[in-house]
Amino acid sequence: MTDVSVRLADPADRPTLERLWLLFRHDMSEYSGVLPNPDGTFRSDRLHAALTRADWAPYLLTSDGSPAGLALVRSLAGPTRVLSGFFVVRGVRRTGIGLRAVREVVARHPGPWEVAFQQGNATAVAFWRRVATEIAGEAWTEERRPVPGRPDLPPDTWISFTAPAEAQGGTSSASVSRAPGLHVHGHTSSA
């Protein structure tokens, strides 16, 4: 089994997250049909928000000291957390890293969650259904919703579940100070 470490990104991680974001958006272009910008990058509004806004938390996934993926969580102050981006590098997919990483991220923010994915991505469909079942048993829902501002795209599939604090390690998020340009959230025990 491949080891995975999940930690909040700090300012020094920004270039790594930006590169992982390019890989993620490249993978997603298969389902969205979106081409890169003229400079070879993809739109990165969500990554920028995760790195700068207090209501977001960017996580870096590593395996044996190397970058292995990312997770972007938004709506930390809202009633429902949203996993706004989740990516695992192809070289470590199907090793259990993704499931372990998402469980750890969700455990840091117990309560209601939502995650969206494309129905045409069969791997994502199976993965997110497994995640929801492992975290919430049979107490999760799935629905299709239009992509805001993109009537040309098929609707996203959304899974909703609640991560119980006692079953997930009992943590809650709290904002902490840090260098300008990257907002990091600390976690404190709720016990």
Image (cartoon, grey):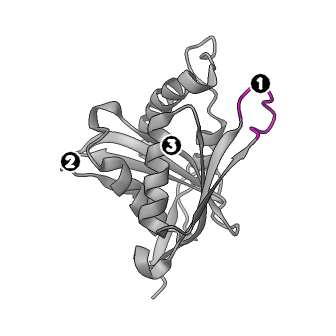
At horizontal 42% and vertical 73% (from top left) the residue drawn is: 168
Local packing at callout 3 (Cα closer than 10 Å; few below 14, some 14-19, many 20+) is some
- Residue 79, x across and y down, in percent: 69, 69
Name the outermost residue toward the top: 38
Question: What is the magenta range?
Answer: 146-154
**Which residue is labeled 1 in the image?**
152
Residue 8 versus residue 94 in the image, above or below: below
Q: Is residue 128 one of those drawn in magenta?
A: no
Asked whether residue 10 appears in the rendered view, the answer is no
Mark 2 and mark 1 lie on one chain; the one further toward the N terminus is 2
Q: Nearer the viewer, residue 9 or 152?
A: 152
Q: Main secondary structure of the magenta part?
A: loop
Q: Nearer the viewer, residue 11 or 122?
A: 122
Question: Looking at the rendering, which quadrant does residue 16 occupy?
Answer: top left
Q: Is residue 149 one of those drawn in magenta?
A: yes
At horizontal 39% and vertical 57% (from top left) the residue drawn is: 7
Kindly identify the amino acid type of the residue bearing the numbered disc 1.
Asp
